[in-house]
Image (cartoon, rainbow, N blue to C red):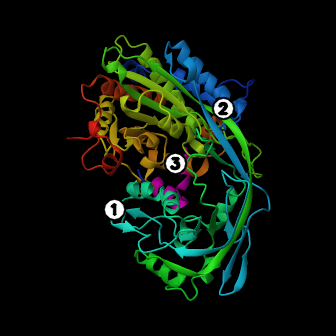
Amino acid sequence: MQTKTLMTLSSILLLSACSATSPSAEAPAVPPVPASPVAAAAQGADANRIAAHMQFLADDALEGRDTGSKGHLIASNYIATNFQQLGLQPAGDNGGFFQKVPMKQSKLVNNSASLSFNIKGKNVTVPYPKHFFTGPSSHEGKVEVKDAELVFVGYGMVSKEFGLDDYAGLDVKGKVVVMLPGRPSKLPSEEAAHLGSLKQRLAAEHGAIGIITLHTPQEEKTRPYANSLMYLNSARVRWVNDKGVSEGDYPQLKAGAYLHMEAAKPLFDGAKESLDSIFAKLEKKEVPTGFALDAKMSFSRESSHTDIQSQNVAAVLEGSDPTLKNEYVVVTAHSDHIGIGNDLRSKDKINNGLMDNAAGVAILLETARLYSQAPVKPKRSILFVAVTGEEKGLLGADYFAHHPLKPMQSLVANVNLDMPVLLYPFADMIAFGANHSTLGAVVGRATAKHGIKLSADPMPEQAIFTRSDHYTLVKKGVPSVFLMTGFTSKDPAQKGGEIWGKFFAKHYHKPTDDIAGLTKDFGPIRYDAGALFADINYAIGEEIANSEQRPQWLKQSFFGNTFGQSYNMQK
């Protein structure tokens, strides 16, 4: 699950206060935990099927399902053949189940990055990576910027709704902007996360040729500079648009660097305000304003590029109503994970991704089976999409949002499944985004039907609504929710929040997110909880598909007002 990579250890510990490898081909499969007789009678979903899907998708043979890898292709074929045997109609390219997603992988050439400043006639070289780091360019090989002027732009944010314009009165055309990470504390977290995602676009639109982001004392407390160096050699992957350009990148932004605060302080010598003064304002939760810096920057790097191919997998269960069958409830889960790691401390290098997100895909497949075998088909059609590249930045979902397999206005809602933690018998569920549309009430009725409570977002500061695949459709105006297991357990001996927090701290994006590693720490995988999750997911989709009125954004929703078309805004 790409969305939670920004969580810190402190937030995990706070969350916890609330309430060997996967089997090889020769090893016997770990038997599923059977549902109780009462639960089994009440549920349509099958825990054994959930177990079979998860065990296959998280097996070592798939080598962690990295985007564009053979292991991920095997996973995609597995999903497609399951759709086929359920009798679903292919919804991909050229009458098949695959929607091909062209991508470009970029890597920084070793020892190619350099950064220096000319400060009052004195040239200062910044050591890499001790005091700065950079990633590869997605559109150019060798890049050189010489003697570019610098302008401090505060947080680099603009919002009419919140009265922000960090570029007001500043000329940044042909210059490099220097900005703070994050956002002003006065902004609501979800809205702030959206506005923060626009920083590159805003810099490019104002004519900047590069961005320097400053490390701050606040960042050092929550995300130490040294920790970031673990990802120095990571490749960058982007999907490629019809013009052959990597989507989401801005070619005019030639330079990009993250700068340690000690290296940044001299840039502010003799300026309108010192960097220490700006940091003091941040401690007081004040918002600094921008100004020109009396310094120039030179920067260079070289990148290599490789074209790769990956795929979304899509299928449709056609609705029964002659008119409403032309509208679609979209159910998504990401099929990729992070592949083979390079942690020298671990003998096991395969990141199997049992919870992230074999569990979500298993629930999607079991939900599809429930629909396909239901005695009465829903009125609207159900579009199932297993998306690729979530861990690389929601790439497959974003490609689908830009190249929808059905007309965009026919997509009435998206229900997204990402990393349900099936390690305890959950007593509540979280639906990120429930407070933005009428889908919140739909989820509440579905959970209540199965004796499960719908809880509010327990970590709103993380803005998780903006950090998974569904958000790419939110930005196209589609009401969406992202479902996750809650933090309370039906078993009084198990504290769901502590288990969830321990999973995230010890196993998330690690080789131990597999059957052996999780069973060792938590006991048997709760495949019966996965079956309950599938039953609730089915009930959510069933109500959406059969309701006369399609889901609507709520009047007060920032996202509805920003993205929602008039046809699905609450009157």
Asked if labels 2 and 3 touch by Cβ distance under 8 angstroms, the answer is: no
Q: Name the residue under label 2.
A: 72
Q: In this rendered view, identify the residue nearer to me: 226 or 383.
A: 383
> Range of the magenta residues?
1-17
286 shown above or below 428: below
Question: Which secondary structure lies at badge 3?
Answer: helix
Per the image, the residue denoted by label 3 is 3
Query: For mark 3, does the 10 Å Cα neighbourhood hold few (<14), some (14 to 19), or many (20 or more) residues?
Result: some
The amino acid type found where label 1 is placed reads Lys
Check whether the beta carbons of the residues at disc 3 and disc 1 lie within 8 A of each other: no
Q: How crowded is mark 1: few (under 14 residues within 10 Å), some or many (20 or more)?
A: few
Residue 448 at x, y percent in the picture: 30, 33
Q: 482 or 550, which is in the foreground?
A: 550
Q: Where is residue 80 in the image (x, y as percent from the top left)?
A: 58, 21
Type of amino acid under label 3: Thr
Find the residue positioned furthest to the top. 375
Residue at horizontal 37%, vertical 49%? Answer: 457
Compared to 31, does 255 lie above or below? below
Q: Which of the labelled discs sits on residue 160, or is there none? A: 1
Dot 2 crowding, Cα within 10 Å, few <14, some 14–19, many 20+: many
Instruction: Tell me the distance, in whole angstroms, between the alpha carbons under discs 3 and 2.
Output: 20 Å
Report whether 338 appears left or right of 422.
right
